[in-house]
Image (cartoon, rainbow, N blue to C red):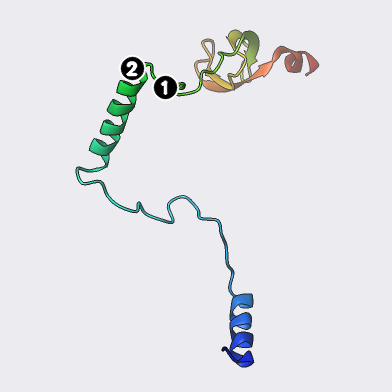
Amino acid sequence: MVNSEFTKDIGKALKDTNVSSEIMPGDVKRRYEPKLGLNKHNERIHKESAKLDRSGNLPFTFGKKKVAPGRPVVKCCANCENVVGVNEKTVGIICPKCKTYSSVKDLQERVQE
């Protein structure tokens, strides 16, 4: 039903057009605004999920995943090399000795320098 020239023209137009299936956050607004507003909508969702959570009839719970805390380790301040005890996941501290924010480094790095 469609003639060949029209098909060729569409093919050329599509070839030059960048078609992306990825949508970046913020590109598309909400599909609808809740009647009572977004805050009331979120409050209602949290209240209802907490009520279901307390009932105990579900095989899952609403909430964040339980994450094990990091183990305590000894690291040193990158500025003054003050030795401090911190969590293994710590990347920066306000040093109690030099009173500035600093990254922390392992004691092995301190010895190698």
Up-down relation of residue 81 to residue 50 (above or below): above
**Residue visible at 50% across and 22% down in the picture:** 65
Q: Quadrant of the N terminus?
A: bottom right
**Residue visible at 51% across and 10% down in the picture:** 96
The image shows a total of numbered marks equal to 2
Q: Amino acid at mark 1?
A: Leu
Q: Quadrant location of residue 89?
A: top right
Residue lying at the far right in this picture: please name it: 112
Q: Quadrant of the C terminus?
A: top right
> Residue at label 2?
55
Up-down relation of residue 107 to residue 64 (above or below): above
Side (left or right) of 100 relative to 44: right
For residue 74, the mark is: none
Q: Secondary structure at mark 1?
A: loop
Q: Amino acid at mark 2?
A: Ser
> Residue at label 1?
58
Side (left or right) of 92 relative to 54: right
